[in-house]
Amino acid sequence: MADFEIGEEHFLLDGEPFRILAGALHYFRVHPDQWRDRIRKAKEMGLNTIETYVAWNAHARTEGEFDLSGGLDLGRFLDDVAAEGMYAIVRPGPYICAEWDNGGLPAWLFAQEGVGVRRDEPKYLAAVDTFFEQIAPVIVPRQIDRGGPIILVQIENEYGAYGSDKVYLQKLVDLNRRIGLTVPFTTVDQPTDQMLQDGSLPSLHKTGSFGSRATERLATLRANQPTGPLMCSEFWDGWFDFWGAHHHTTSVAQAAADLDDLLSAGASVNIYMFHGGTNFGFTNGANDKGVYQATITSYDYDAPLDEAGNPNEKYWAFRSVLEKHGAVVGSAQPTPAPASPSFKTPLTRSLGLASAAPLVGAWDWYDHLPTMDAIGRWDGFALYRAEISLSGPGVLSFGEVRDRAIVTLDGRPLGVLARDHHDVSIALPDDARGVLELLVEDQGRVNYGPRIGEAKGLIGGALLNGEPLLRWEVLGLDLGDITPVADALREGSAGVTEIVGAAFGGPAFAFGEFDLPAGAADASGALPDLYLDTTSWGKGVVWVNGFNLGRYWSRGPQATLYVPGSALRATGNEIVVFELHAATACVGFAPHHELGHTDF
């Protein structure tokens, strides 16, 4: 056991000055069998601390559920940090931003009428209270004064950019203390006078979030906090990407120089990100500042350790800077992995969505147009259908589409309504009759700003030639466990067809099998990571051995999906592809990750 405090000038570890040299590593974005490797490489770069958010909505996918298993085993992650001789900073939110779906807040929470968002509101705070009680048995006994690695806990997250409810902040402080947390508490805000004042309390230690102009920004922080250690607890060393945009990178030399300036000023640091990882499944967030932009599957972030855990040029530049400032770098030096196996395998069977629907959900009738949230579908997809019969031309319109809808009539494609294009209406064929169907995709909930907590699906009702269309049948696709679909495809159940030719059309699920090339395992028996080439596919989602790799889209910039070696088998791997439009019936693996073009 040890003692950690905030002193007049420094952080104090057992009474001695201690500089925090931390790196952000989110356990929920990394396969659990790879946690130790990533933590060890942080230590080898010269870091002494690992920082992580806690993603509430990952642990509580539905109300009343709390999952701490597998990749959500926060206790195991913190124990891995301790086993590598590192300290930990935990940021439980409840709001985390992090380019993560809904900023970490559970979507089901906002199904309650009148619930607040990040403010002193009883329903919201009651749910937060339950969440903190659920994580208390994990984090309380792992504090440094009880023999664990946790030295700091953060209250909320960049709250000054959102609000200024001091009562709310104080209630979070009281809650954190009530569950048994005794380590010092911090807040983080962008270093402007207004944000630093709005986002914290006199009893909390203020830290900054920035990626450049360190001397200037630390001066602003000091002006708002005359005593105590200076800390940039989000040193932005890269950035994230949106579908349809370019891949963001930052200058290695400039990033290293900014880190040098920060450390030369005597400040502590948390490098955001040290290792970004992946938005597996449907976990990516989105921004909407007038135009909706969904975050891609990769969260590489141009961090020192790339998405596959390999050190890059920025890693070595940061290592040199840290060593210059007295960091103890590891004697071992990580080496980049060799090129991954490059091979192809066919997709052999497909199952149209119409046939697959009973395997992933059940139809229910509504006398109004419900949102996805109203039917309890918190991510992924929902199918909406209604009978229509027109004489003459027709126009179908909605209040809003969140976020993308493929429109068909008796199975014939009519078009796509896309939120990022502000589409809300579509022309129908003259004398249209039959079953109108819309496959709606939640492309990621907004994680920053006033649109946090908004519902998904078709919003504000439907109008057919200006008249309300009220009778709808809706099915939410439960893709959390793809086993029923995989079983049907493997066994050739009813509705499954053999893929004949070079391509197949969607919306449909497709199936293939593959073995790794002989000799692919390393000397320890570990299997290599793979990079799934998606350039000949349209838009969809991929599972390998039941593990959801995330979304792909021909819009880019991302052109490969990262496949952790820990999710693979030497032989008998199964791949399931949910293609929304059309794709080649071939699975290709590339030797290197391809995250797309940059803006230079």
Image (cartoon, rainbow, N blue to C red):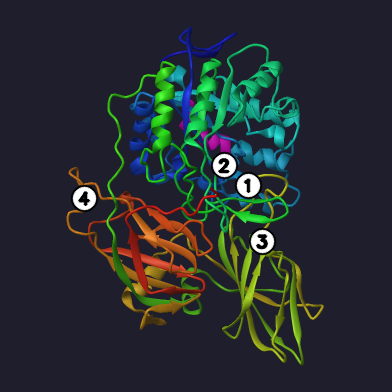
* Residue marked by disc 4: 521
Q: Residue at label 3?
A: 420
Viewer-side residue, 24 vs 261: 261
Q: Mark 2: few, some, or many residues within 10 Å (few <14, many ≥20)?
A: some
Name which of mark 4 and mark 2 comes first in the sequence.
2
Q: Please name which of the two marks, 1 or 4, marks the residue nearer to the observer.
A: 4
Considering only order in the chain, which callout, 4 or 1, is on the residue closer to the N terminus?
1
The residue at the point 52 percent across, 24 percent down is 269
At mark 4, the secondary structure is: loop
User: Is the Cβ of the residue at disc 4 closer than 8 Å to that at disc 2?
Assistant: no
Residue 98 image label: 2
The first of marks 2 and 1 along the sequence is: 2
Q: CA distance from mark 4 to mark 2?
A: 34 Å
Residue under numbered circle 1: 447
Task: Give the CA distance from mark 1 to mark 4.
Answer: 39 Å
Q: Amino acid at mark 4?
A: Ala
- Mark 3, Cα crowd under 10 Å, few <14 / some 14-19 / many 20+, is some
Q: Is residue 457 visible?
A: no
Q: Which span is picked out in magenta?
A: 131-140
Magenta residues, dominant SS class: helix
Is there a contact, CB below 8 Å, between mark 2 and mark 1? yes
At 56% across and 57% down in the image, what residue appears? 243
Look at label 1 and name its amino acid: Asn
Q: Are marks 4 and 3 in contact (CB under 8 Å)?
A: no
Residue at mark 3 to residue at mark 2: CA–CA distance: 21 Å
- The tag earlier along the polypeptide, 3 or 1, is 3
Task: Using the rendered view, name the quadrant where residue 187 is placed.
Answer: top right
Q: Position of residue 208 (x, y in %)?
A: 62, 26
